[in-house]
Image (cartoon, helix red, strand yellow):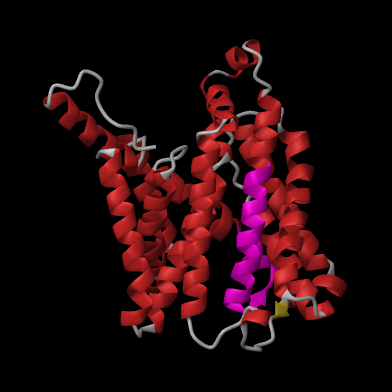
Amino acid sequence: MSAKRLQLLGITLLAAAIVIPAFVDSRFILQMLTLIFFSIAMTSAWNIPVFGGKMSLGHAAFFGIGGYTGAILYVKFGVSPWIGLPAGVAVSLLGGVIMTLPLLRLRGPFFTLATIAFAEVLRMIAIDWRSLTNGSVGLNIPFKPGWANLTFQSGAPFYFISLILAIAVVFIAYRLRHSALGFHLRASASNDEAAQALGVDTRRAHFIGLLWSSGLTGLIGVFYVFFIYVVEPNTMFSTTLFSLQPALNGIIGGIGTIWGPVIGAVIMTPLGEYLRVYLGTIQQGLNFVVYGVVLIVTVNFIPGGIVSLVRLKSSNRSNGSGSPSGATEAH
């Protein structure tokens, strides 16, 4: 698919997304679309370190830190959510620094496993620090409708907030991937030793990439808390929801690309909700079996994700028309 066609398709889908609330009264549909946009933002933020070959399964840590920061400031200290947003980002960045510095030397599965441990430690702290977090009981966001409190009576405001958030994170990921940082990350992923020999500070590149990812994830976490009105450790630091699910979306769509996380989130979010509700009534956890099958099939038959099929189709068309070089990259 050519760049112009991709741009036209993107503009068309964006225009359709903007006008949907005017024609759709179903709260369920608006909520599902909102969850899809949140998932796009989360997966795209998670995908940034993957540019450099660093796959984290501990992003629930940053999501939880951001969400808890915004909720605690609002519920316990009466601080506006709009101040809680930058505060949540700042604390998530601090968490990113604490996690990243000691783990940068780890590679491959060792880095991935260490990030899981980091998220689990933070979940246990949230459970045990009852004076601040209310432990396993969690905190409830008071329902005081209004933009000042970031709570609303209808689903439309958060629909547009999540849409803007998704667009912003995808755009940031796009700019990062095509910046000097992005080239350094991709060089490191291809051959870290060769990149260092050419003068690329790969440790610095990985550090900055992970900070971008952690800060954006924390921002998403704050918005998500005010969307669901509750914050508790097992949800906010859920490895399944906010670490494994973005990874699954990215792998199925195409990790290390721009559009792969978008495609994966659009497909897997409604499918995941349907499987959780439908299969959950048959046998709890059966939906994860389906996830596993989908993941195995994807890795074995389309290791580049769904986005690679678009790239392959574009390449075949270009070669058929006599183009010597092949396809326009699908990013």
| x, y percent for residue 188 | 58, 23
- Can residue 283 be seen here? no
Q: Residue furthest top?
A: 197
x, y percentage for residue 242?
A: 57, 57
Stretch in magenta: 211-238
Residue at figure coordinates x 38%, y 78% from the top left: 21
**Left or right of residue 5: residue 158:** right
Q: Residue 230 in magenta?
A: yes
Quarter of the image for residue 183 reads top right
| Residue depicted at x 32% and y 48% | 7
Indicate left or right for 194 with 34 as reference. Answer: right
Q: Residue at x 45, y 49 (%)?
A: 248
Q: Does residue 266 show up?
A: yes
Vertical order, 219 against 211 (above or below): below
Q: Is residue 4 left or right of residue 95?
A: left
The majority secondary structure of the magenta stretch comes to: helix
